[in-house]
Amino acid sequence: MSKLRCHISISADGFVAGPSQSEQNPLGEGGERLHDWAVSLAAWREAHDQQGGEVNESGPIMEETLENVGAGVMGRNMFGPAGGGDWGDEQWKGWWGDDPPYHYDVFILTHYPREPVVMEGGTTYHFVTDGIERALEQAKESADGQDVMLWGGAQVIQQYLAAGLLDEIELHIAPVLLGDGARLFDNLGGAEIELEQVRAVEAPGVTHVKYRVR
Amino acid sequence: MSKLRCHISISADGFVAGPSQSEQNPLGEGGERLHDWAVSLAAWREAHDQQGGEVNESGPIMEETLENVGAGVMGRNMFGPAGGGDWGDEQWKGWWGDDPPYHYDVFILTHYPREPVVMEGGTTYHFVTDGIERALEQAKESADGQDVMLWGGAQVIQQYLAAGLLDEIELHIAPVLLGDGARLFDNLGGAEIELEQVRAVEAPGVTHVKYRVR
């Protein structure tokens, strides 16, 4: 059965981005340190059409996040700079260039309608204005039996968690204290969310912990 | 060289106790779930003079927390019910019975002076009213070259972290979301604290991650 999965890098104190996110600094102050473990990996570099990189225990974890995924969902504040209003001249096409590393339909939650944007390599950005359930429905339809990846950011993950719609979450816990920023597990409004630890993997500079969500 | 070490069970959302801590419910609402992984262990039961228990990857972790420790430090709100004032009739002697599982000097941070309390089995409770540095000094002197264990709770750990006095912290990350309570990494006042991941161990129902603090 098609699952809604999520994996995200997080600081030891629970933040998935630092304070003061902006177009110049999309992960906020210090936030890029959350991804130090990832960007040096051969698996990451291959997915981003680069050569070389390190091979360690994080490689198979990273590769697994790409397997059996047929569509994606993300929030407006991940697709573009935080706090954006309407789409203006519609020039913004995400942070990931002309050939984004998704290669499937990505459904972007927004309050502002916009026509789909077809990118190179099989990625199409769709803009969904009628809520998280509808975005998930559309993504599952597009995924055609494969899983849907919930890319973030924190607010969108919180909404899916609180609504009981997330099936699996893997935390890449970085040895970093950010002190402030976007806290992942917040605004859950007392929702009864049960986690079951599926596995934990030690790797250089990061610990990967996967939970089933019930 | 003698280190100040800390190990503590923590929820996936960063709490080391639930909300509404009290004498009846010292770990707060839901907080006892943070220790499910521990109390069933043979290593834990042995340290608490009980028989039997499970043997798994958590056993050696638990045993290691007992090794080379010559003294302890804890806060008033861990030694007794949260929010306690002066010591009253001095009948309170901790949560751990006549023969506490420490078997060394434990230095308790408090605003209220009290004579030391000698317990069975080598544990003596000392009450320190002149601050965290002085408590650590006394504990190191008592430990005589062995390490000092910082037992908690959250506020005291935060104080030692912010002051740059903690050398090592191991998190036992439980697959639990508490939503509210005592957050471990909080009130650090912008202190520059660097973590280095020493190791991570997967075990049933918990992930153990140890950091060196710099």
Image (cartoon, coloured by chain):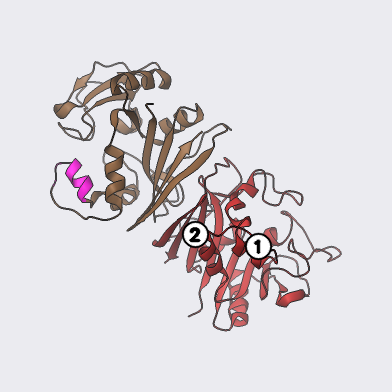
Chain colours: A red, B brown
The residue marked by circle 1 belongs to what chain?
Answer: A
Is B29 contained in the magenta span? no
Residue A2 badge? none
From this view, report whether residue A108 is shown above or below residue B26.
Answer: below
Q: Amino acid type of disc 2?
A: Glu
**Camera-side residue: B54 or B179?**
B54
Residue A144 coordinates in the image, percent (x, y): 58, 84
Which range of residues does the magenta coloring cover? B42-50
Is B46 contained in the magenta span? yes
Q: Residue furthest front?
A: A52
Where is residue B65, by image quadrant?
top left
Give the secondary structure at mark 2: loop
Q: Which residue is mark 1?
A: A45
Where is residue A53, by image quadrant?
bottom right
The residue marked by circle 2 belongs to what chain?
Answer: A
Q: How many marks?
A: 2
Q: Residue at x 60, y 59 (%)?
A: A41
Give the secondary structure at mark 1: helix
Find the distance from the CA under tag 1 to the CA under tag 2: 15 Å
**Camera-side residue: B39 or A87?**
B39
Q: Mark 1 near mark 2, Cβ–Cβ under 8 Å?
A: no
